[in-house]
Image: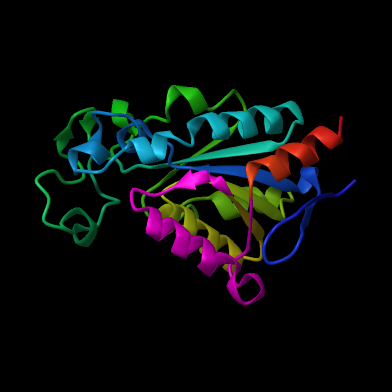
Amino acid sequence: MPLTLTARPYPFCFDLGRAALVIIDMQRDFIEPGGFGESLGNDVRLLSAIVPTCQKVLAAWRQQGGLVIHTREAHRPDLSDCPDSKRNRGNTRLRIGDIGPMGRILVAGEPGNQIIPELAPASGEWVIDKPGKGAFYATSLHQQLQHADISHLIFMGVTTEVCVQTSMREANDRGYDCLILEDCTESYFPHFKAATLEMIHAQGGIVGWTSNSAELLGALESRG
């Protein structure tokens, strides 16, 4: 039976068997004190504040047997998938591939590149290492979703305005119906988050829908 969430700009309906929970870039370097994000001067408490709510959603989704997808922004150790334009962007002391507080920054396999323990992938869940901001760029995600007959994606993770929104826009262009849980996403800049959420559901849902964890948890609980 389809589930329906109260959402903006209008209700979001989906079949759990054709939906996936997509958790974007909940990586130690972005979330934890002492990581790369904090070394850049960001207040990581803003991002870590959503972890308990994300945990509740993840546990409920798993209990219902829904597909879970985790992403990590990660590059090969030789940085062959990291263009100079990305590595050299910004006037920063530490760049992608350099040794940071938790190992080489945004390099696959490094401690800081791992998903935080509170949301660690379970056996059988998908983990997508992406070299770009969006989850579809230079990955096999679209092909995997098509093979699994997935049509609806529910997003949470960080940061709202960069990797989450980019992934939603990529998914929207590929024909997926997308929703973001407002209390399960965050930015180092709260006004960026607010503006992004407005963009997503503007003009009749130009990118997708927005809702909250209580709506999703209630819908999942109603299934028994």
Looking at the picture, how far across and down is residue 203, in whole percent? 62, 77
Is 76 on the left or on the right of 16, as rendered? Answer: left
Q: Position of residue 181 (x, y in %)?
A: 59, 48
* Residue 148 in view here: no
> Does residue 186 show up magenta in the picture?
yes
Q: Quadrant of residue 96?
A: top left
Eyeballing the image, is 85 above or below 64? below
Does residue 65 appear to the left or right of 69 in the view shown? Answer: right
Asked whether residue 45 is in view, the answer is yes
Image coordinates of residue 150 in percent, x first then y, are 71, 51
Position of the C terminus, as image quadrant, is: top right
Residue 107 forms part of the magenta stretch = no
The number of discs equals: 0
Does residue 202 sit above or below 37 in this rendering?
below
The segment highlighted magenta reads: 182-211
Which residue is drawn at the image coordinates 53% and 29% (left, top)? 52
> Of all residues shown, which one is farthest toward the bottom?
203
Q: Nearer the viewer, residue 19 or 154?
A: 154
**Which picture quadrant has residue 61?**
top right
Please state which of residues 107 and 180 is positioned toward the viewer in this rendering.
180
Relative to the observer, which residue lies in front, 214 or 65?
A: 214
**How is the rendered protein coloured?**
rainbow
Percent position of residue 209, x then y? 64, 61
* Direction right: furthest residue: 1
